[in-house]
Amino acid sequence: MNATNGKSLCVGRFAFMAPETMMVNGRGQSIYSTAVEAVPLPADGLDAYWTTRLKRMGPEPRVFELETGVKAAWSARNPQFPNILTIETAKPVEGAVLVAEREADAGKESIAETLVKVILRSYVPASGFGFCVGSGALTVDPSINETARLTLGGRDLPEMELQMETHTVGEPDLTTGSNVEEERAFVGGAGGTLRVLRDQTRAAAGLEGKEIWISAEFPGEKPGLRFSWHYPGVAASGVLPSIHVVASAPLERRSRLELLWESVMVSLQRIPLNPPSDK
């Protein structure tokens, strides 16, 4: 990483540094239209975890073993659409459970099962390359259907939050987080006041995006800050998706928010697709 302080985090195909005071509050990833996440192995073990998951799948899931050691089940989650089935799998991996979930039309289960197998087999217990899914990464080829989201909160300051989202686009997203006047209209419509602190282009991870800082105050509420950075993405590119980063905090915590923001922006970088060559 470019920065030396803090801790390294990753989301999808990007990594960055964040202050130690920030903790992960939530994450989610999808690749090839399949939701995948590596979650910590529960203290009561994989079987107990799987039993709990089965109870959430609705009546009579069809339980089977996708591959040796990989638990799986098909279920119809929505009774209004009985022909739309969902496969969920759980694979034990070095101190974690690799969970995958995707939908398929009835009669096409084998196609979905084959794809899920490919995804699960590509897992590596490190995030130095590939597509980050938590405590590890997937090394399948990039997809034109990828999304990733990571939310951080302040361990000692719950009001401070940062969220980073990435998703592949059919065409560059030139509207999200790019127009201060829309922000001004929204705040004004709610009876508040807005002040623009920064509105400029800024490069991060070698990508040129739009950076906007605003302060806003609504009647009866404490003034707040909202920083955002948006990269529009390249059409149909898994490695150059649209990126949207938003951080917020009370106005009196501006110095802390700026520290967080600069840590992320300066250190943001693309994760290599493959491990370094031995040559």
Image (spheres, grey):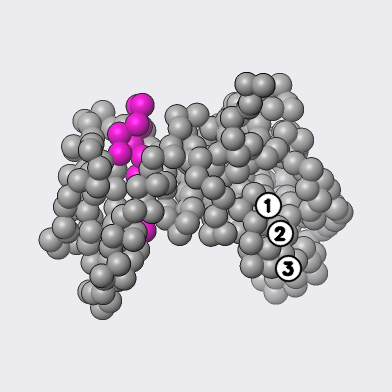
At 33% from the left and 66% from the top, the residue drawn is 104
- What kind of element bears circle 3? loop
Name the residue beneath numbered marker 1: 240
Which of marks 3 and 1 precedes in the sequence? 3
Left/right of residue 125 with respect to residue 222 in the rendered view? left
Q: Which mark is residue 175?
A: 3
Q: Which residues are magenta?
A: 91-102
User: For the residue marked with disc 2, what is the amino acid?
Assistant: Val
Name the residue beneath numbered marker 2: 234
Q: Is residue 142 visible?
A: yes
User: For the residue marked with disc 1, what is the amino acid?
Assistant: Leu
Q: Is residue 187 visible?
A: no
Determine if the magenta segment contains residue 107: no
The tally of labels here is 3
Q: Label 3: few (<14), some or many (≥20) within 10 Å?
A: few
Q: Single out the residue that lies furthest toward the left.
A: 60
- What kind of element bears circle 1? loop
At 16% from the left and 52% from the top, the residue drawn is 63
Determine if the magenta segment contains residue 98: yes
Query: Are circles 2 and 3 on residues that touch, CB within 8 Å?
Result: no
Q: Position of residue 187 (x, y in %)?
A: 71, 67
Q: Position of residue 268 (x, y in %)?
A: 70, 38
Which of marks 3 and 2 precedes in the sequence? 3
Which of marks 2 and 1 precedes in the sequence? 2
Q: Position of residue 217 (x, y in %)?
A: 72, 58
Dominant secondary structure, magenta:
strand
Left/right of residue 212 with respect to residue 63 in the rendered view? right
